[in-house]
Each structure stands twice: as structure tokens, then as C-alpha cells.
Image: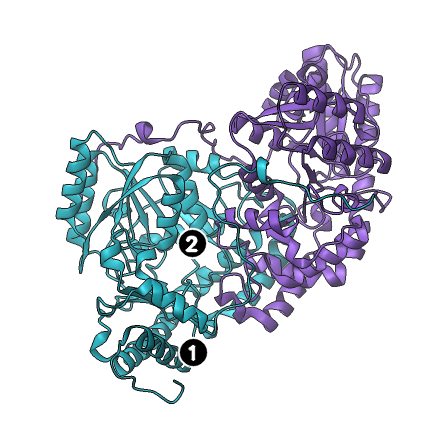
Chain colours: A cyan, B purple
Amino acid sequence: MTAAAPFDFAALIAPGQPPPAVKWTGFPRHNFVGGHNDPEHVPVEALAAAANAVLAREGRTLATYGLQSGPLGYRPLREFLARKLKGHARIACDPDEVLVTSGSLQALDLVNALLLVRGDTVLIEHASYGGALRRLARLGVDAVGVPLDADGLRADALASALEDLARRGIRAKYIYTIPTVQNPTGTVMSEARRAEVIALARRYGVPIFEDECYSDLVWSGTRPPALYAMAGGEGVIHIGSFSKSISPALRIGYIVARWDILSRILALKSDGGTGALEQMVLGEFCPAHFEAHVPKLTEALRAKLDTLMEALAEQFGTAAEFEPPAGGIYLWVKLPDSVDSQRLAQMALAEGIAINPGPEWTMDKAYGGSRLRLCFAHPSHEALREGVAALARVCNREFGVPAQIANVRGG
Amino acid sequence: MTAAAPFDFAALIAPGQPPPAVKWTGFPRHNFVGGHNDPEHVPVEALAAAANAVLAREGRTLATYGLQSGPLGYRPLREFLARKLKGHARIACDPDEVLVTSGSLQALDLVNALLLVRGDTVLIEHASYGGALRRLARLGVDAVGVPLDADGLRADALASALEDLARRGIRAKYIYTIPTVQNPTGTVMSEARRAEVIALARRYGVPIFEDECYSDLVWSGTRPPALYAMAGGEGVIHIGSFSKSISPALRIGYIVARWDILSRILALKSDGGTGALEQMVLGEFCPAHFEAHVPKLTEALRAKLDTLMEALAEQFGTAAEFEPPAGGIYLWVKLPDSVDSQRLAQMALAEGIAINPGPEWTMDKAYGGSRLRLCFAHPSHEALREGVAALARVCNREFGVPAQIANVRGG
């Protein structure tokens, strides 16, 4: 058959599509974005050993959808999660109240698909995960930002926002919070604050959507009970991930919810199950190695954070303000008001430096305008120092900030 | 915090939800449903060796989303797919025209998300994959069934359906076809028929959605060029899978499309990438082993099909009519009109025998009413014989068909 005229799909495409993807051309030279992890701390040998062991023992079960565990996911992994969540976050749940997902991004999409329709309202921390904000915008959902303080989501502001919505006859579909290592501020919500948030959510009949994808990476190794734990599972949907504790490429996250809700979420998961090999390998690796692995990783991340903060102090001086986060892989930085972080991000990207500008991570664009998020897990210590120096040069050139550059050699 | 009253989610749930999932209680004893594969032919040792090799070489790349390959998927796997599709299906595509998905089910969902809105019309083979039919029903899409014959989708019927829609001012969003080992009929669309279908699709400006998830499992080892190949990629979206050739639990499928379409589909894939370990293992396994693995698998499947057909002949006699499929893992069986296959499925399930009743796999409920689909890849030869005997007993008891039962011992 000979070549045909180009087929015109344009008239057939459903409305409301996001812009087409651009071709991927590799990572930027100085990469301060994305939830990448420390390549030196991927437990490669132990994962390979786990793969060998589990394939030798159960490899033939790959012939069935869901292995021998059903659609919730590989049972030994769900059993590990139930134990880990009990020990770590005080969550009492049955393995059948855990659904293994393709990363916590699929978890976000599933919870949104269950609850949201265009025109709905949700409450969200006024600085929050950019991917969550983009999803809400695309779904046509009104996201009401609630300010944060050092203890996390402000209960007084949450009370006002809920009361205001109630006065207008609006029941929000959920309160989305990242209580433990908040993204991007790095705070941990205090236990007292958690209790206040739960009480408010109950009073107004609004569920809590608790995203704990960073909660394993607390420097201190301990954290308050999860909101899910404190609420006894009532009115809370909890999600988490192995992306930050083991590997983001593996795409293994999870949802914890009571069966009446989880059964509805599971009905929406139309992908034939989450990848089995990754589940099997984690199900084999984690019981033996997770507890020892995480402190080694967090120690390395903490050291990289120190390097980043030192480099910022050296290169930006007092122009860069930040609070050391309680854990995680990112630092939330305030530059002088004269800096437009969105323009800075564009200018920096042109020189191979990728940063998250504040407005993409906030509901309150004025608050976010001169802020930026710097992810520090993936670059080496040397790359962190070089990247901050390169960013300082761009920022100085564009905004006169910092006024003096510490390292002018590469300028 | 003390136990709270049960939180009532009911008022918060978005409309149009599917029914909640039911708790999984294990596979039925006689399992003739689901795309499970032959456990004896999962290449376990070679997959483990591939995991070792690729993790030793590239394990640290698990620290980044998308490894070092970007969001389309692991590049060595996409390169393998481009070569395999060229050799096998005559598709000329670049690895950057291949998107690795979480099984071909995610591929189905992505293509539907790109093209369909409630009230749209699509054309579909009048007997087709139940999961595709359920998706269309849930999306509120009008699926117009087009009859099949031994050469696949009937071109005369397709022409009539397209002309009828055109007269009513309707442009269908796509023609969904499973041309190579059609599900459930097991036919392979002839090359001449493919050319007719492409010409009709072009004449009416309707794209072809070609699902080739079973196309590796052709007994003869060869098949006509893909519709995508014959159309030079114009106006065709092609999907496929490793579920049937390697393992359904792995959840690795793919979409082949021109970049102008693939970039839009990629923008809708919001899951942070398909599972990396599975992609890496297949990317390592396939170049070395895929070509030798598939004929061994199809030989085993062909032998199981023979056992199933013999058991049907023995147990049902002339009451069970069927055409031997050209490949695949299922047999499409016609029972006498007096048998209601949906009721048979219910009665059989109560005795631990799972079958797909025809009405769930057809647009034309009258045509499907006394038909059923039997999957034969997973049960052993002995289990196939026992399962057919057990099904015959139920069918005889409920419908008097078959009139005499060959094996009355277990009755």
C-alpha cells in the first residue's frame, strides 16, 4: 500500500487535553528537580539477590495476573507494609486494606477519580506538590490553599476555610495534606496539630487525603502517628511510596483505606495489577533489609542537604533564606522579592540548570513568586556545589542577586 | 484519639463509578477465564539471569525516574520492540514512536482518554475483548458491532456501518480491531481484508485502533503485516503486549504511533513511568531469548488446545461447535441455542468452574447467547480434561446438553 496523505487526528481528539509531551533530550546538567534519589544508595546487590530468591521460589506464578495474591497486590509486600506502617506510623491495618499501586502518582489519580468532578472544591496546603496542583487544575477542581507554619497545616486557617465553604454551602471533597516532610517546606506536622486537623475534618464531614510519600526520610528516624492512625482509619485515605526510600523508577506505591473505600478504588484500577516483578523483589527485599537501608540513605541525604545549604550560604549569602527541613530530598528557598523565580527557572534552564519555581509549587502565587525548590538527592556533593554556583551566576546576571558572587571563575 | 462514628463517604463519591470490587478469594478450581499463561513456560531462569546482568550493569540508574531513557520507557526495550515489530509485523517505526505502558490495558485506557467523550461512537468487531467492551460501556460510548467471518472483520459490513454513520452525520472515533488472533474467535485477518479495512478507514476519515496483544502466538509463526505497517503508520494506533508471550503479571505493553499522536498520549500518562525493573529485565531478556522462547511456548499452547478440543468432543460431542483458532490462548465455543451461556457461567462458577459467557464478549447478545470462551493456557492437560467434564455435567443438569455425559463418575 502506498503512502497516504497525513491523517488528521485533530478533529477527533477529546477536549481538555494537556499540551503534547516534548521530546526528552536527557537530564539537565545541573538537576535540582524531580524526585530522583541518590544513585550510590540504590541497594542494587540486595535487590538482585531478592530477585534471584523470589524468582527461584515463585517465578512460575508470573503466569497469572496478580500472581497468587489477587488484584490488591503481592501479599508478602502488603504484609510487610502492614507491619511497617504499624511500627513506623502507628497505623493498624490489615494487608487487605492495602492496595499496591504504580507509584503514589497512580494512587493520586485513583483517589481523584473516586471523588472529584469538575467544579468540586478541595482544601490543600498553600504550598504543595506541583503534580497534585497540576492534576487538580486539569480536573477543573477549585483548590483552596491553606497556609502552613512550622508545625504544618495551620489549624486556625483550616477552620476559617472550612467555615467559609460551609457558609457558601460547599462541602470540600478532601483536605490534601503531606504532613510528614511536607512538600516543599520540609516540615513535620506536630501531633497536636494532627489532632486539630482531624477534629476539624470530622466537624465539617470532609475526608483527609494523607500523602506520606516522603515520611520514611525523617532525619530523626521517628515521626508522629499518621493522621490515618490517629483517626482510626475513619475518614482518611492514606498513600505512600517506595519511590523515595528505595527507587523512584520502580513505581511501587500504595493506598491504605478501609475496605468500603478501597473496594471502590480497586474497581477503578483497570490496569490488570501493578508490576509483579517489582512487587516480588520489594516483598523479598524489604522484610530483610528495609529497616537497615533507610538510615543509611537518610544519613547520605542529610549530608547532601548540608552541602546544599553550605553552598547556598557561600554563593547567595543572606539573599537565600531557608529553614532546614526535617527530612526528605528538597529545600524550599526564599530569595529577595525582586527575584521572579519563574523567570529565573527559565533563564537557568537555558544554561542547563533545572529548578522548581515557587509558583508551580504553591496556590498563593505572591508567596511563591520569589521562592524555589531545590532537590538535592541525586547530584553528587561536587555537582551540588557547582550547580548552586552556576545558579548564583544566572541569578546575579538577571536580578543582581546575590549582589556579589563568591565564585566568579566560571562566570 | 478515640474511635469515631463511621465516616460517610457516600455523598462525596463522584457519579458513574463501577461497582465496588469484591474480595478476592483465590482462583476458581477450574479456571477457563483470564489471560493467564502456561506456568511451565515462564522463562524463570533466563529472567533471573537477565535481572542479575542488567542490575549489575545499570542498577544505579534506578535512582532516576525513567532510568536514563526518558518517559517513553527503557530504551533497549523500545529498540528491541522496533526490531521485533519490523521483523514480525513489518512495522517500520523508530524507538521514539514506541511508548512502554503498564500492560496493554493501560494502552487501551490512554487511547480512550485521548479520543473518547461520552456520546461518541466507535466501531468494533461484534465479538471482541470483554475488557474493551466494558470500558466503552463505562465511558458512555456507543459501540457499533461489525460482524466477523473467517478472514476477520467483514469489509462489506464495515462499509455499511461507516456509510450508515456518515448518513447520520456521525464520524466514529476509531475502528477497534484485534486482527491477528482475534479475541475471542481466534481468526487472523487476511492481508486482502486488511487492505480493504484501511481503504475504508481512510475514505471515512476514521482511525484504526489495532490491538495485537496476541499476535506473537500464531501457530504457524508467521502472520500478515500489521495494519499499522500497511498504512505506513497513517491513521493507525497500534498496541501490543508481553503479557501473552512472556508473563501477564509483568504488566508490560506498548503503543506504537506517530509522534504527533504519541506525544499527546504520553502527556496523558501521569504515572511517572512504567515499572523500571520489568522493562530492564525484558530489555535484557528479549534480544537474547525472545525468538527462541515464543515457538516453545506456542507449541505447548497448541498441545493444550488439542487437549481442550478433544475433551470437548469427548464430553459434549456434536453439541460443542468450534473452529480451531490460528493461535492464542482461547477457544470460542458454540453450544446449542437452548443453552443460555450466562446462566451456565453462573451455575458453573458455583461449582468452581469459571468460563466467559458469550454475551460479555459480544455486541450482539443473540449471537453470543449460547457461546462461551474457554482459556486453555494455564490449566494442565489433566485439569483441562477434568474441567471440561465438570462443565459438561453442569450443562447437562441445567440444559440437558450434552444429552449424554461421557464421564459420569464424578456426577
- The reply, left or right, for residue B338 in relation to residue B69 is right
Q: Chain of mark 1?
A: A
Q: Is residue B188 visible to the viewer in this orientation of the structure?
A: no
Q: Residues within 10 Å of mark 1 (few under 14, many from 20)?
A: some
Q: Secondary structure at mark 2?
A: helix
Residue A134: x percent and y percent? 38, 49
Q: Are marks 2 and 1 on the same chain?
A: yes
Q: Mark 1: which amino acid?
A: Ser
Residue A371: x percent and y percent? 27, 64
Q: Secondary structure at mark 1?
A: loop
Q: Nearer the viewer, residue B236 or A89?
A: B236
Above/below status of B117 relative to A51: above
- The reply, left or right, for residue A360 in relation to residue A48 is left
Residue A166: x percent and y percent? 18, 32
Question: Residue A380's mark?
Answer: 1
Q: Quadrant of residue A57?
A: bottom right
Q: Mark 2: which amino acid?
A: Phe
Q: Is residue B168 visible to the viewer in this orientation of the structure?
A: yes
Residue A241: x percent and y percent? 41, 55
Q: On the image, numbered disc 2 is attached to which residue?
A: A80
